[in-house]
């Protein structure tokens, strides 16, 4: 069977080459060609013997998910839609800022967890993405940005941060997520620091413990409510893993985390979870967990029953948290005009017909021939 090499991290590639009687350094060479140089063509991997290159051609392939569309918002946010087969598509969003460039990627087609305010959740669960489909988003966006390393590279740091906050629940697809994370951190691949890679979870407690042990990166937890009663409604997985267990898992995670805090995400829903008293309840709830808050103004989508909290309410809510000494930021809503904001991702193939994009780019995949 032909192996998609984008499915393999360093350990997987080493095992692959061992099976074919090759030494471990081959894995490093190929890893660098694939993930430092963005090279898919074995013929140009010139430091590998021609006979092995020919063999690779028959044993293996390099197949990222195909880009269906690439749209740029008025504010520079760029949304990519990828075909993952079977009529499904997933999305990635690149958010350029002065000091950094953040890529938000998906881990599942759809999501089974059905949070009541989330567009991805509303489309239901389709399937887990493979490693190649997860890391392939980074691979393809690097191509689109021209951000590979090598003699002619023009922006290898364009993607300085990766957040797993796109479609799906990363910890419900833990094995593939961990392998993709290992590639992101590997110096022979993307070489990102653990602090610059963030997994966002709605709170799958056992998987949080596994992530901590297998590949502890920065952690964001989607809290959204200050008590179990409300969280049960907004984030149904809370019925299985209630707040007491979730917060204990956060504390355990921090024993190995690359940062000394957890980021709590809190979507601001008008009249639902945005009262002063709820901010104070939230402070009491999270007292024992070193944390920061990130308030996310709700992003509406067709058919959703919620409204975004008004700006003055979000400011007041933030003030209460800040006055108690908790670092609190409010997420800028970006990419509104191309439905690229948090919780608006619903990459069904239907999106192909959407007319909301301002500009559709012709993809230029400038594959480099030489790479150091
Ligand atoms: N499944 C993971 C990661 C993907 S969702 C999780 O739930 O954490 C990424 C973030 O977007 C989560 O904090 C999620 O609660 C939030 N989100 C979902 N729908 C939203 C919406 N309509 N408006 C604003 N934020 C939303
Ligand atoms: Fe899934 Fe996250 Fe959306 Fe909830 S918020 S339905 S966990 S993607």
Image (cartoon, rainbow, N blue to C red):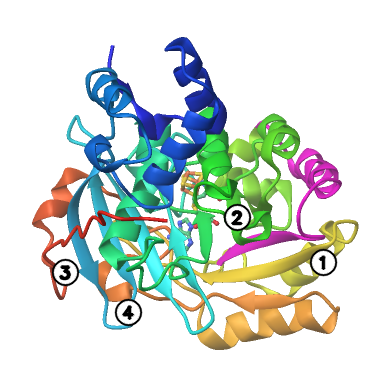
- Tags 2 and 4 in contact by the CB under 8 Å rule? no
What residue is shown at x 9% (from left), y 55% (from top)?
Answer: 353
Closer to the chain start, of discs 1 and 3, is: 1
Classify 217 as above or below 155. Answer: above
Q: Which residue is mark 2?
A: 198
- Which of the 4 image quarters holds residue 2? top left
Q: Which residue is mark 1?
A: 283
Magenta-highlighted residues: 240-267
- Which of the 4 image quarters holds residue 282? bottom right
Closer to the chain start, of discs 2 and 1, is: 2
Closer to the chain start, of discs 1 and 4, is: 4
Could you say whether the residue bearing mark 2 is in a helix, strand or loop? Answer: strand
Q: Which residue is mark 4?
A: 76
Q: Which residue is mark 3?
A: 356
Could you say whether the residue bearing mark 1 is in a helix, strand or loop? Answer: helix
Classify 181 as above or below 5. Answer: below
Give the alpha-carbon distance from disc 1 to disc 3, as whole Å.
39 Å
Residue 244: within the magenta?
yes
């Amino acid at each position: 069977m032909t192996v998609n090499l984008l499915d393999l991290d360093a350990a997987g590639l080493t095992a692959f080459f061992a099976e074919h009687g090759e030494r471990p350094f081959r894995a490093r060479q190929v890893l660098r060609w694939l993930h430092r140089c963005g090279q898919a063509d074995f013929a140009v991997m010139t430091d590998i013997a021609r006979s092995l290159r020919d063999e690779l051609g028959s044993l293996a392939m390099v197949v990222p998910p195909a880009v269906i569309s690439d749209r740029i918002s008025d504010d520079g946010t760029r949304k990519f839609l990828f075909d993952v087969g079977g009529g499904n598509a997933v999305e990635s969003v690149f958010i350029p800022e002065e000091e950094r460039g953040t890529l938000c990627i998906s881990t599942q087609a759809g999501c089974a967890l059905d949070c009541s305010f989330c567009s991805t959740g509303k489309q239901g669960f389709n399937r887990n993405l493979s490693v190649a489909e997860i890391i392939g988003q980074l691979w393809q966006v690097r191509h689109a940005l021209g951000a590979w390393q090598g003699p002619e590279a023009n922006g290898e740091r364009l993607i300085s941060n990766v957040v797993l906050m796109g479609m799906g629940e990363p910890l419900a697809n833990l094995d593939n997520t961990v392998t993709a994370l290992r590639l992101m951190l590997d110096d022979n691949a993307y070489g990102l620091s653990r602090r610059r890679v963030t997994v966002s979870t709605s709170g799958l407690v056992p998987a949080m413990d596994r992530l901590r042990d297998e590949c502890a990166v920065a952690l964001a937890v989607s809290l959204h409510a200050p008590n179990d009663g409300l969280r049960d409604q907004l984030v149904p997985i809370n019925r299985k893993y209630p707040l007491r267990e979730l917060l204990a898992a956060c504390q355990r995670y921090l024993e190995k985390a690359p940062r000394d805090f957890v980021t709590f995400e809190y979507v601001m829903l008008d009249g639902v979870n945005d009262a002063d008293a709820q901010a104070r309840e939230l402070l009491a709830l999270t007292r024992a967990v070193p944390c920061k808050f990130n308030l996310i103004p709700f992003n509406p989508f067709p058919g959703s029953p919620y409204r975004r909290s008004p700006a003055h309410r979000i400011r007041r809510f933030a003030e209460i948290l800040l006055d108690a000494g908790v670092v609190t930021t409010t997420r800028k809503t970006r990419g509104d005009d191309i439905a690229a904001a948090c919780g608006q991702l619903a990459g069904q193939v239907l999106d192909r017909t959407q007319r909301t994009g301002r500009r559709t780019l012709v993809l230029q995949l400038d594959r480099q021939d030489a790479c150091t």
